[in-house]
Image (spheres, rainbow, N blue to C red):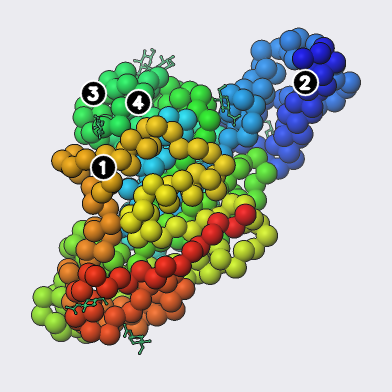
Amino acid sequence: MSPVMNCSWKIIFLLALALIAIQYKAIRNFSTKPVHTCPTSGPLNCTLMQDMEPQDRACEEYSLFNYNGSRKTHILILATTRSGSSFSGQLFNQHSDIFYLYEPLYHVQVALLPKLILSRNPAERRIMMGANRDLLRSLYDCDLYFLESYLKPQPTNHTTLKLFRRGASKALCTPPVCSAYGPADINIEENTCVKQCGLLNLTLASESCKERGHVAIKTVRVPEVGDLRALVEDPRLNIKVIQLVRDPRGILTSRIETFPDIYRLWRMWRATNRKPYNLDESLLTTICDDFLNSVSLGLSRPPWLKGKYMMVRYEDLARNPRKKTEEIYDFLGMSMDSNVEEWIQNNTRGGASEVRDKFGTVRDSAATAESWRIKISFDIVLYAQRQCEQVLDLLGYRMVNSSDELKNMSFSLVEEKPFPPFL
Ligand SMILES: *[C@@H]1O[C@H](CO)[C@@H](O)[C@H](O)[C@H]1NC(C)=O
Ligand SMILES: *[C@@H]1O[C@H](CO)[C@@H](O)[C@H](O)[C@H]1NC(C)=O
Ligand SMILES: *[C@@H]1O[C@H](CO)[C@@H](O)[C@H](O)[C@H]1NC(C)=O
Ligand SMILES: *[C@@H]1O[C@H](CO)[C@@H](O)[C@H](O)[C@H]1NC(C)=O
Ligand SMILES: *[C@@H]1O[C@H](CO)[C@@H](O)[C@H](O)[C@H]1NC(C)=O
Ligand SMILES: *[C@@H]1O[C@H](CO)[C@@H](O)[C@H](O)[C@H]1NC(C)=O
Ligand SMILES: *[C@@H]1O[C@H](CO)[C@@H](O)[C@H](O)[C@H]1NC(C)=O
């Protein structure tokens, strides 16, 4: 490369940095961390980069950029409880260049609203979503200290034992954060990680985040994609939303099994075939309303979501994990690495047998995605179909008209329907 070309490249790079710095100042200060002031005025010359003070050099290493100087991608897996989100999260968790966090918003919810199911109260929702967005913004910036105000007990010396499901995040179990595992290990036991790694050093976690090319966060605590508009439009971030959906009848069935207390009356209905008069219908309708609002908005392709939204049906992912994962990575403009491929290979039907279920995900993902059909009564399914008719139609899930149809697994309830990403 000639010196001239070299020089102009540097100027462009510095100008880009300066532009970002201006945007930063203009919009809002970033979380709790002091914002580095990058050189923004005066003639830029070719020696500037070398002459920069160490503090200014930090601009170059700014955590929203990766080591190549290109923008990091901030992946948000927008899911709901029992929609196959642990399985889907693994497709990012296993990638060696992605810093993946599993449900960090749990801590906001526990601090502000200690209830399991998201509140329907609009005021409460607004407050929580404000806090959620602030936390997401900081985490995408690799500022893990921001979590500390939500952790109990409050961490001392930036270390904690209390991060929710720390072991579900490979980056928090592998170097530089913890040396109990190698970087390519795809078999990390959640509980073993916590035991072996001990205190989580949030300074090291932030460093690990900065070193990686991209950040992915999975959450079931954001009801609708519309709640994310402020983040998606934030010019400092480079958010891509992967909205994971699943047949609401499957989600309902799975939740009935997983949360026996909350769904006590639904269990009674299933056992007695009689619908309890005081059934809490919102435990079903919330699922469908959130999907309907969110997916209708996403599929209506508003300009602010352009290039930033992809809807994925869990059933499609489960039936064809490799192909679907490739599509997702294509949309992100990234390629999956050998860790992801190996994980898919070993944890789905395509792979060898006998690796047991370690992640709340399962080997025969396709069978599991539809197994709800033999665990629920036709009565409840009919009711769910009436309540969720619109969203079933929108997402391409077939209604059943008889118990035989429901239980006949060679009759698929998932219509072939492409949902191309909004590019
Ligand atoms: C940003 O931070 C600077 C210095 O820390 C402070 O003077 C300024 O008021 C802050 N701006 C906003 C919008 O908070
Ligand atoms: C960034 O650099 C790494 C290593 O030099 C390279 O493998 C990777 O393809 C680059 N990524 C981009 C997006 O340029
Ligand atoms: C925090 O670190 C300081 C200095 O290393 C040490 O003196 C102090 O005991 C630590 N606090 C706790 C609670 O571990
Ligand atoms: C956490 O890691 C940082 C960076 O390596 C180190 O300086 C700090 O002492 C560690 N904190 C504790 C409490 O070990
Ligand atoms: C994944 O499966 C391959 C063979 O299919 C095996 O060689 C490898 O050890 C497995 N990896 C893990 C981590 O279980
Ligand atoms: C079930 O009934 C609906 C509405 O009556 C009808 O549109 C649908 O084709 C039926 N499904 C099957 C599989 O017969
Ligand atoms: C199950 O569905 C398939 C495909 O629609 C149909 O051919 C078959 O007869 C059904 N089996 C029973 C037992 O109803």
**Is the residue at mark 3 in contact range of ligand 4, meaning its CB lies under 8 Å from it?**
no
Q: Which mark is residue 184?
A: 4
The reply to whether dot 3 and dot 2 touch (C-beta < 8 Å) is no
The residue that mark 3 highlights is: 196
Residue drawn 72% across and 25% down?
A: 37
Q: Is residue 300 visible?
A: yes
Q: Residues within 10 Å of mark 1 (few under 14, many from 20)?
A: some
The residue that mark 1 highlights is: 351
Label 4: which secondary element: loop
**333 on left or right of 369:** right
Q: Distance between the Cα atoms at labels 4 and 2?
A: 35 Å
Residue lying farthest right?
43
Q: Distance between the Cα atoms at labels 2 and 1?
A: 47 Å
Residue 100 placement (x, y as % from top left): 42, 37
**58 on left or right of 11:** left
Q: Amino acid at mark 1?
A: Gly
Label 2: which secondary element: helix
Q: Residues within 10 Å of mark 3 (few under 14, many from 20)?
A: few
Q: Which mark is residue 10?
A: 2
Label 3: which secondary element: helix
Q: Amino acid at mark 3?
A: Gln
